[in-house]
């Protein structure tokens, strides 16, 4: 039993059926502008943002969260744009995976992201899930945060107090934990320009295509710099400084690739869970980093 009060719909506390539905009762608002959304968020300490709902609705249905107010940002057209600014891709927070899949701009300006998308969940989830929702949820096995961290993307956070821009490695703080304050909305993700001579590779192991990754790896090869990242192995996607350092100033040949892949395995400190043991993840990190480096460089490691 809902009654409208302005743009905010209020769940009546007198609703006799409140305990018979899956989520706990909450008020609902669908603001028409970002400034209205920010005002609403600032006005209620227990308010939460609703984007694609693919992670948060299950959380509500299990009653793992009880927000007083859900602020639905799906009507904010200003957060739904894909654009190119100063040569870098900019994604509004409610851009959906499906929008990215359909975008020729994304395919041209970040082929790694375009490729990684196909590993994210299933068609129905990609139809609703947003880049801002995935980033704010911060699952350590999620592909989008991993690609953004490897590329050195920046995260734009806004509140009624103002805005700030954080690099990915300061935005992601741990498993399901980000730098977002309670009154902040993630509004945009900015990728640096994609160098034309860059080579890249992405690999992941999942029980089935579309399942969350048990482990994933990605590399970027730029003249003079190799970046290596593993995700699904710790509390967030991480670059591997020791493995990267082993390749600095060196010709990328079979010996160098094997050494870097071994270091990658040694460098991570994964945990075991119901999907895989820590030892399995370490072994797979070596395999996936080796495959990525082999594919990106074109050097044949396995005959
Ligand atoms: C069966 C299944 C399989 C999946 N497999 C994968 C997978 O393989 N890889 C993968 O990466 N993901 C996977 N996902 C997760 C999916 O990508 C979700 O879409 C994503 O994690 C959350 O995006 P959303 O837009 O649905 O966010 P929501 O569920 O709406 O929100 C998630 C959280 O972020 C907050 N939030 C959302 N947007 C903002 C914002 N702009 N500013 C501040 N806070 C915000 C919400 O308050 C909430 O706490 C899977 C999900 C399901 C259900």
Image: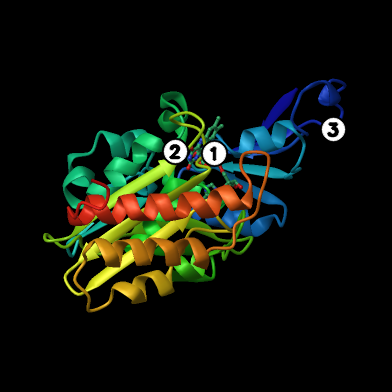
Position of residue 97 relative to residue 230, above or below, is: above
Percent position of residue 194, x then y: 20, 60
Q: State left or right for residue 282 relative to residue 100.
A: right
Which residue is denoted by mark 3 in the rendering? Answer: 13
Identify which residue is drawn at 51% across, 67% down: 267
Query: Which of the two labelled residues, at mark 3 and mark 1, occupies the earlier sequence position?
Result: 3
Q: State left or right for residue 266 relative to residue 83.
A: right
Query: Gap between marks 3 and 2, in whole Å?
Result: 27 Å
Circles 3 and 2 in contact, beta carbons < 8 Å: no
Q: Quadrant of the N terminus?
A: top right
Which residue is denoted by mark 2 in the rendering? Answer: 75
Q: Is residue 99 visible?
A: yes
Residue nearest the observer in this picture, 144 or 202:
202
Give the structural element (helix, strand or loop) at label 2: loop
Q: Residues within 10 Å of mark 2 (few under 14, many from 20)?
A: some
Percent position of residue 46, x then y: 72, 52
Give the structural element (helix, strand or loop) at label 1: loop
Q: Residues within 10 Å of mark 1 (few under 14, many from 20)?
A: some
Which residue is denoted by mark 1 in the rendering? Answer: 30
Position of residue 121 relative to residue 256, above or below, is: above
Query: Which of the two labelled residues, at mark 3 and mark 2, occupies the earlier sequence position?
Result: 3
Identify which residue is drawn at 19% across, 57% down: 297
Identify which residue is drawn at 27% across, 77% down: 248
Percent position of residue 200, x then y: 24, 54
* Picture quadrant of residue 87: bottom left
Circles 2 and 1 in contact, beta carbons < 8 Å: yes
Query: Gap between marks 3 and 1, in whole Å?
Result: 21 Å
Q: Residues within 10 Å of mark 3 (few under 14, many from 20)?
A: few
Residue nearest the observer in this picture, 16 or 259:
259
């Amino acid at each position: 039993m809902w009654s409208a009060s302005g743009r905010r719909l209020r769940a009546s506390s007198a609703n006799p059926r409140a305990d018979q539905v899956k989520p706990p009762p909450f008020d609902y608002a669908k603001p028409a502008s970002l400034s209205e959304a920010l005002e609403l968020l600032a006005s209620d300490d227990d308010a939460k943002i609703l984007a694609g709902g693919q992670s948060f609705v299950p959380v509500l249905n299990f009653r793992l969260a009880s927000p007083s107010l859900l602020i639905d940002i799906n009507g904010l057209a200003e957060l739904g744009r894909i654009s190119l600014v100063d040569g870098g891709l900019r994604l509004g927070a409610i851009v959906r995976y499906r929008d990215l899949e359909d975008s020729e701009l994304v395919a041209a300006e970040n082929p790694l992201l375009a490729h990684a998308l196909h590993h994210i969940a299933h068609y129905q989830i990609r139809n609703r899930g947003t880049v801002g929702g995935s980033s704010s949820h911060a699952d350590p096995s999620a592909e989008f945060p991993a690609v953004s961290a490897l590329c050195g993307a920046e995260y734009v956070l806004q509140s009624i107090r103002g805005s700030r821009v954080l690099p990915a490695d300061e935005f992601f703080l741990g498993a399901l934990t980000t730098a977002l304050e309670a009154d902040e909305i993630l509004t945009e993700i900015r990728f640096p320009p994609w160098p034309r001579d860059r080579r890249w590779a992405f690999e992941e192991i999942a029980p089935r295509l579309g399942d969350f990754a048990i482990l994933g790896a990605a590399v970027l090869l730029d003249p003079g710099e190799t970046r290596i990242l593993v995700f699904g192995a710790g509390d967030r996607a991480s670059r591997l400084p020791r493995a990267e350092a082993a390749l600095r100033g060196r010709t990328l040949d079979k010996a160098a690739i094997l050494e870097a892949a071994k270091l990658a395995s040694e460098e991570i400190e994964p945990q075991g869970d119901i999907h895989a043991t820590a030892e399995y993840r370490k072994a797979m990190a070596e395999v996936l980093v080796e495959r990525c480096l082999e594919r990106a460089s074109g050097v044949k490691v396995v005959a």
